[in-house]
Amino acid sequence: MMLNKVYTKLVALLKARIENADPIVKQLKGTPRYVPGSIVLRGHTFKYADSASFLFTYEEIYKRSIYKFLSTRERPFIIDAGANIGVSVLYFKQLYGNARVVAFEPDKKIFAILQDNVNAFGLQNVTLVNKGLWNEEKELRFYAEGADAGRISTDTTASHVIDVVSLRSYLSEPVDLLKIDIEGAEMIVLKDCESHLQHVKNIFVEYHSFVGQEQSLPELLDILKRAGFRLNINAPGLISKNPFVKVNAYNGMDMQLNIYGIRS
């Protein structure tokens, strides 16, 4: 399948780049996709749902430090929307040991792995929420890809139902970092809590563009600009080098962007 070939090629490039220096990659070399397992990470057992997506996330978070931020507060408050198996949560707690972290993950299977990983490292002041984010509290259908790309879905691909909640009530106090990686629900969530973004110091949004669907990027950028953020944008793994000739797609998406909002 063409989509899997694109992702597999990206993972292969990442492996080639860090294999000689990183024991994590060596532990997972040759591991098949979508087979749950565990590795030794920083002296503790860390579980994963899919080796390829873990390696990609590990490269982004630990090698490229895409979530690194500065805080003058002794106990920074971090909201991790889309925590998946917990690589980001672990990174945040190693960056700021006294940080308070609220982490959302709606997929029950992935959430169980997240819980195990947080417990294995003995992380304190971490609140795990087994819900997705939306503009109201309700139940929605959810498509579980089996790795890191589960998302809210209204079509026949949905595999089960999840609980969702509004982010507004979590933004009533200063937030040092709001990280949003929620596979396409980012626009609905940001529109819903726009009036509360004044409490956020730094924001990270992974924007997802889906094949055949209207793109909401201009509106998303306007929300962040109105909230007083200065923006910086770069592209993660899904890249089309010659989009006039061919637009690459993976898991129904034809573009992803890492959007940083920085408040001076």
Image: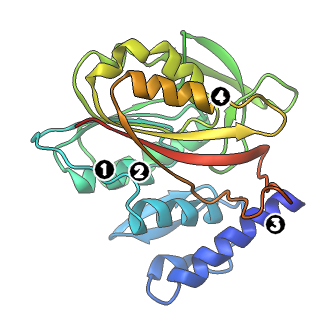
Q: Residue under label 1, please give it.
A: 92
Locate the C terminus by quadrant. Answer: top left
Can you say whether 42 is above or below 88 in the image? Answer: below
Residue 216 badge? 4
Residue 223 pos. (x, y %): 47, 23
Q: What amino acid type is highlighted by mark number 4?
A: Ser
Q: Residue drawn 77% across and 64% down?
A: 6
Q: CA distance from mark 4 to mark 2?
A: 26 Å
**Could you tell me which secondary element the residue under label 1 belongs to?**
helix
Question: In the image, what residue occupies the spot 53% across and 78% down?
Answer: 25
Q: Is residue 202 above or below residue 196?
A: below
Mark 2 = which residue? 88
The amino acid on which the numbered mark 3 sits, given as a three-letter code, is Lys
Report crowding for label 2: few under 14, some 14 to 19, many 20 or more residues within 10 A (C-alpha).
Answer: many
- Labelled pair 2, 1 in contact (Cβ < 8 Å): yes
Residue 126: where, in percent of width, then height? 30, 38
Indicate which disc, 3 or 2, sits on the residue closer to the N terminus. 3
Task: Name which residue lies at 19% across and 50% down.
Answer: 97
